[in-house]
Image (cartoon, rainbow, N blue to C red):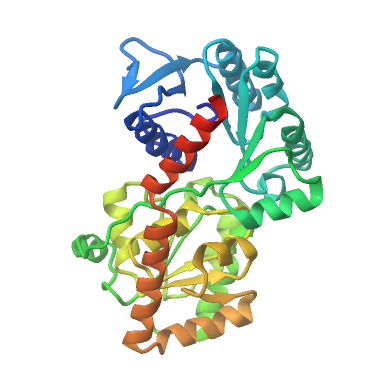
């Protein structure tokens, strides 16, 4: 497995995915190696039964990621049955292991080329890499069927593709009320949004709709304010007295209670497939108010309230404020049940193990 910074997970979604999946594959009798960024004296060579190979990129700046992927792919040419690249940003380079007869799987992580954080040249590059993945991979893996449909409608059907979801951590308990109170919030009496500062996550729309709605419940936002920039300044300027911008909160022991004790979780992500932040909200039995797009609909089904624009979100806040306890509980339990039944890590690991064994038979 390559394409992440490595394990143990300390950074983000792909690192968590690599750790959660690799240790479970090892438990199912499959030898797994995860390539990790960086080297140093005493760097571990094993983690919970997973072999670790450390690689130091030999390139500066924006070329660092490509150099890291290239070095990992070169090292993976001879030893492995399946080379699994997480993300398609280096998909053209994935032709290298193919020359040595390796199977190459590429995880098609969302519609990266649509993200506004990238410059126009970077978006063009990612668009080309999405196309290259169809030529270099022996199998494309999507975490969302709606995402596969969208990509294959534009690119044509891949020779081999699979839909295997991302996993949801499950924590159905009421611990951590003191963490919520530490942030100046009352358990059960606030809305929560957790997202990076990117326009396609609709934080501006969420703040404006909440302010106009007249809801008396505060809106707490966990986001990477350290990024700064014009988008962050605009977010701060439009925030009212009932908006609490908490900044970045990465520690699970702090973020999980914030999710668990929210009146509802507001999800504005609109680009990509199965979003880890949404799954984490479902995994603690949040009621969810989600942006209406095919990706979120596939994950949540009818266990959510949906909105397409600010006007609909304003109404959704008012509707959520007025929810009867039994209806809110239906949304909470429905979201948790979908996380448990469709996005449990054990089921996902079973799917990967089956596909790996079929592929190398």
Left or right: 162 in relation to 126: left
Which residue is drawn at the image coordinates 41% and 39% (left, top)? 16
- Residue 157 spot, x, y in % from top left: 76, 45
At 48% from the left and 46% from the top, the residue drawn is: 226
Task: Name the residue at 34% across, 67% down.
Answer: 285
Front residue of 51/214: it is 51
**Residue reaching furthest front?**
361
Q: Can residue 144 be seen in this view?
A: yes
State the quadrant of the C terminus. top right
**In this rendering, does residue 246 appear at all?**
no
Would residue 66 appear left or right of 282 to someone viewing this image? right
Q: In this view, does 38 lie above or below 351?
A: above
Rendering coords of residue 62 (x, y %): 65, 27
- In the image shown, does 110 or 203 lie closer to the viewer? 110
Q: In which quarter of the image is residue 332?
A: bottom left
Residue 345 spot, x, y in % from top left: 38, 46
State which quadrant residue 129 falls in: top right
Q: Position of residue 242 (x, y in %)?
A: 41, 76
Q: Is residue 285 above or below residue 66?
A: below
Q: How many labels does the image show?
A: 0
Residue at image location 62% in from the left, 53% down from the top: 272
């Amino acid at each position: 497995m390559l394409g992440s910074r490595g394990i143990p997970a300390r950074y983000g979604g792909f690192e968590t995915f690599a750790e959660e999946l690799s240790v479970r594959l090892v438990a199912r009798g499959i030898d797994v190696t995860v390539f990790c960024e960086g080297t140093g004296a005493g760097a571990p060579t094993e983690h919970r039964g997973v072999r670790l190979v450390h690689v130091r990129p030999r390139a500066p700046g924006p070329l660092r990621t490509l150099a890291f992927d290239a070095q990992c792919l070169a090292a993976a040419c001879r030893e492995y049955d399946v080379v699994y690249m997480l993300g398609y940003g280096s998909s053209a380079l994935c032709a290298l292991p193919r020359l040595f007869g390796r199977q190459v799987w590429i995880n098609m992580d969302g519609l990266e080329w649509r993200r506004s954080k990238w410059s126009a040249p970077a978006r063009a590059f990612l668009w080309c890499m999405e196309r290259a993945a169809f030529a270099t991979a022996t199998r494309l893996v999507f975490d969302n069927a709606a995402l596969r449909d969208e990509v294959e409608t534009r690119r044509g059907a891949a020779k081999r593709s699979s839909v295997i979801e991302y996993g949801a951590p499950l924590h159905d308990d009421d611990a951590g009320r003191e963490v919520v109170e530490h942030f100046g919030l009352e358990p059960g009496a606030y809305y929560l949004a957790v997202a990076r500062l990117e326009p396609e996550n609709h934080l501006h729309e969420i703040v404006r709709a909440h302010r106009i709605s007249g809801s008396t419940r505060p809106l707490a936002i966990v986001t990477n304010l350290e990024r700064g920039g014009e988008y962050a300044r605009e977010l701060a300027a439009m925030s009212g007295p009932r908006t609490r911008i908490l900044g970045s909160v990465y520690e699970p022991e702090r973020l999980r209670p914030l999710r668990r004790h929210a009146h509802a979780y507001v999800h504005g992500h609109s680009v990509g497939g199965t979003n880890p932040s949404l799954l984490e909200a479902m995994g603690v039995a949040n009621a969810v108010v989600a942006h209406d797009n095919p990706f979120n609909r596939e994950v949540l089904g009818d266990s959510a309230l949906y909105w397409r624009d600010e006007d609909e979100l304003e109404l959704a806040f008012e509707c959520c404020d007025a929810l009867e306890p039994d209806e809110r509980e239906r949304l909470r339990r429905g979201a948790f049940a979908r996380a448990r039944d469709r996005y449990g890590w054990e089921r996902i690991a079973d799917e990967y193990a089956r596909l790996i064994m079929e592929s190398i038979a």
